[in-house]
Image (cartoon, rainbow, N blue to C red):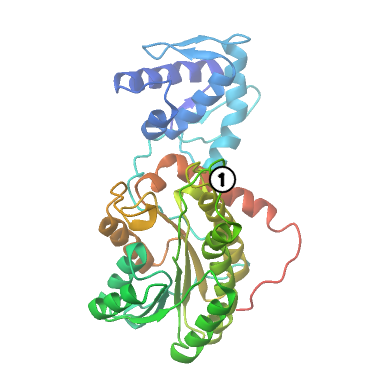
Amino acid sequence: MQTYASPQAFKQALEQRLKTASSSGVDFGRRRQLLVFDRFLARVMAVLAERHVGVGREGQLLGGQDGLGPVFELLTRWLPHSCVIHGFGYSEVVGPQKAAVPVTMNPDRSHMMPRKIRNPGVRDGKSMPNPISINSANVLITGGSEGIGRGLAARFVAAGARVLVTGRSGERLERVRSELKVETLINDLSRAPEREALACHVREAMPGLNILINNAGIQRRVSLAADTAPWDERQAEIDTLLSAPVHLNHLLVPGMLAHGRSSLIANVTSGGAYVPQPFAPIYSACKAALHSYTMNLRFALAGTACKVVEIIPPAIRTTLAGPGATHGAPLDEFCDAVFAALSQGDAVEIGFGATAGPALQERIALDHKLFESFSGRFPVKTYAP
């Protein structure tokens, strides 16, 4: 590990690193490109930009609001805190009148892998739930007649699980029942009575349910200024995307805890939960709320045998965006990656492609850090083991 005796020494090493980035074709004006090259370097550049420090073509540092010296004194104070919070790796930096503090500086090129984060919900030294045996699992997938739901259903069936899928179209459900050999139930999750009817059906027909995947979704692609639809239509989107998983979890969690087997709840959110999408604003807002709810559900179930996972798809080639949509990641590749991560049992968030990239990883890590810092402020009741 390299140790720098002064901010000036660190400045010289940083300029060399910037020169290396420059020779690798990095455009310092494009934060996204720099993040892919080196997340730590991108964070340093953000601080430099705030202090009006520019970067020349050869990586040399130029200008500075108050000269470069104070800027690097600022960096040596900032680095230990910011880098530890965000999980960066680096070289030691010694600030004025400070002991050496470890900071990492290694490029991260894992952004194309499914994103898996350690379980932050385990409290009081309790261990994580035992892995679920997929070949003997009882699985409920909402919105399972097409797209992501159908893709995951096919993989669970192939692994030997018993699978129940729901959907609104009897025709599509009959097709998936015939082709995949799953159980089906026509059900409109936007309506509370039908959610209660689904829970009753599960308690009677599948009392050993131990994997619940809240996948059902609709997406209205209309901007806020252009939306003139009747409120009932907008409410149906909110109820399908947010009310449905919250209500269904409330109805089914007691039974999933009562049978004592290791269990799993996976809520399907979206990249739009983290980066609002103006073309689908209500969808984005509901997915952001579902992300928040998922973190609280994980907290409430920590220490039980029920694990909570957030699946974060990028744009996927499905009919969610409307008939004929062809953009997005291939459905089979996404489902393969998600199923593998669920089977391994150590994932808390699962992203793919763009939603497994370093920028979103940084945001998720910060969410966890802040949640862990503030979640213990007030005593709350949680589910008993």
Instruction: Give the answer, above or below, for where 225 lies relative to 345.
Output: above
| Visible residue check, residue 48 | yes
Q: Quadrant of residue 182?
A: bottom left
Residue at screen point 48% across, 73% down: 188
Label 1: how many Cα within 10 Å (few below 14, some 14–19, many 20+)? some
Q: Residue furthest right?
A: 378
Name the residue nearer the viewer: 158 or 385: 158
Task: Work out whether residue 122 can be spotted.
Answer: no
Say which quadrant the N terminus sits in.
top left
Q: Is residue 306 above or below residue 123?
A: below
Please tell me whether residue 51 is drawn above or below residue 206 in the rendered image. Answer: above
> Which quarter of the image is occupied by the C terminus?
bottom right
Tag 1's secondary structure?
A: helix
Q: Is residue 275 left or right of residue 116?
A: right
Q: Amino acid at mark 1?
A: Leu
66 sits left or right of 264 in the view: right
Rendering quarter of residue 28: top left
- The residue positioned 71% from the left and 59% from the top of the image is 376
Residue that label 1 marks: 366
Q: Position of residue 43 (x, y in %)?
A: 50, 30
For the residue pair 250 and 165, the one nearer the viewer reads as 165
Q: Position of residue 156 (x, y in %)?
A: 31, 74
- Give the farthest residue toward the left: 179
